[in-house]
Image: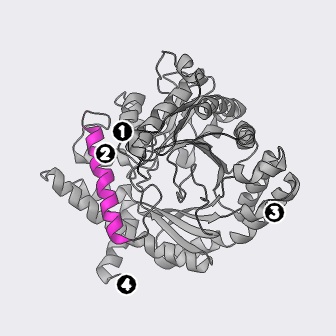
Amino acid sequence: MLSKNEILETVNMVEKEHLDIRTITMGISLLPCVRESADKTATAVYDRVAKKAENIVSVADELSKTYGIPIINKRVSVTPVSLITAPSDGGEIKIAKALDKAAKELGIDFLGGYSALVQKGMTSYERRFLESIPEALSATERLCSSVNVGSSKTGINMDAVKLLGNIIKQTAEKTKDKGGLGCAKFVAFCNAVEDNPFMAGAFHGIGEGETVVNVGVSGPGVVHHAIKNMKGASIDEIAEIIKKTAFKITRAGTLIAKEAAKRLNAEFGIVDLSLAPTPVMGDSVAHILEAIGLSSVGAHGTTAALALLNDAVKKGGVMASSNVGGLSGAFIPVSEDIGMINAANNGAIDINKLEAMTAVCSVGIDMVAIPGDTPAATISGIIADEAAIGMINNKTTAVRVIPVPNKKVGDSVEFGGLLGEAPIMAVSPYSSEAFISRGGRIPAPIHSNKN
């Protein structure tokens, strides 16, 4: 039970500090939907998603009113779609459109899981699936896609990494009338997790139950408010207050998650306590780092401050719930964080510093706009670098870059809503072509041999 003081604290966090439940995401297994043809599979997929998630929006709205905590997004994740398209002989787009239709009719904002897990190798049907991604993302509105190209146990599939550079370029071109927006719905992963509720990388893992509710809680504003006036505090005192704040945020999220699962007749999965920012002032991870003592995110010390923040959030969360999962830490998407946007515009941060920061944060190079003429091999090189950080450090890393057609360094792009805006950031002018063209697989690190 929550005490009176905890309830009052939560109300204050909602009203003044931008506390919200960023997403309720229902994971749905599509394995029972496999049929002998693409048309029949697509119909079964639509029927199953529409039925299982028919009440997700109304339940979320009811819980928001009952507990007074805003629930911003209602989402669905599904079994990696590549696993159910193998018998359909080229029907990937039909299934993509069926999922998008269900998402629209349910009134959810995004549906994730147009995904493939190719960290060790690719079958012929998985390669075909990957090649369908540009069309799938350009022909749909709410569908999100991800590909896992590596893991600490298997190494990095460089054939998949090479292919993804071209796929991202094609996706940008097919959605050039929207600034390459299709790329904002695609993530390349290393060590992807099966219970992530956040888009664009959510999918329903094959180790999950039939239907599962995962909740993502977000409170950058709450953490910022807690530490912004601690001028003379030591670093360890800052860490303690972040831990206590994360504890309170997680308690609120767990309450909502359990009740949502009960009302939706689904299993309660996890609470992901990632600090996910928005372009709104007062809801920025970058501003937390600056409150710790940096004049601007990107200054020397930024990676250390981010490591402190990420670790303290995790420690506070696991004390509040035994069901913490997903990514759970701090996100650093450039276009979705007003502090990151300002730092990029001022030249305080570049893609190399972002890469360093991803060694200690929850994800990786996220929502970074790059020149439209960036070679596919350079994009593959960015993915390979991030995957290497994840593989060696046994953590999840990811790349979500947008090569914006007809834009160059110095320009900017506006995506709108939670996706925000971003300056076009420079990439290395030196070629990765010969390296990426080799293909093959980067072997797993020695510490993977734990059996």
Element type at mark 2: helix
Tag 2: amino acid: Leu
Disc 2 to disc 4, C-alpha distance: 33 Å
Q: Is residue 315 magenta?
A: yes
Q: Which residues are magenta?
A: 300-321
Q: Which residue is mark 1?
A: 357
Provide residue 246's location: percent of width, then percent of height: 33, 63
Side of 248 where 236 appears, left or right: left
Q: Closer to the camera, 357 or 403?
A: 357
Q: Which residue is mark 3?
A: 44
Identified at 54% across, 21% down, the residue is 408
Provide residue 232's location: percent of width, then percent of height: 12, 51
Tell me if mark 3 has few (under 14), some (14-19) or many (20+) residues whose alpha carbon lies within 10 angstroms of its own.
some
Q: Is residue 56 magenta?
A: no
Tell me if mark 1 has few (under 14), some (14-19) or many (20+) residues whose alpha carbon lies within 10 angstroms of its own.
many
Magenta-colored segment: predominant secondary structure: helix
Tell me if mark 4 has few (under 14), some (14-19) or many (20+) residues whose alpha carbon lies within 10 angstroms of its own.
few
Side of 227 where 318 appears, left or right: right
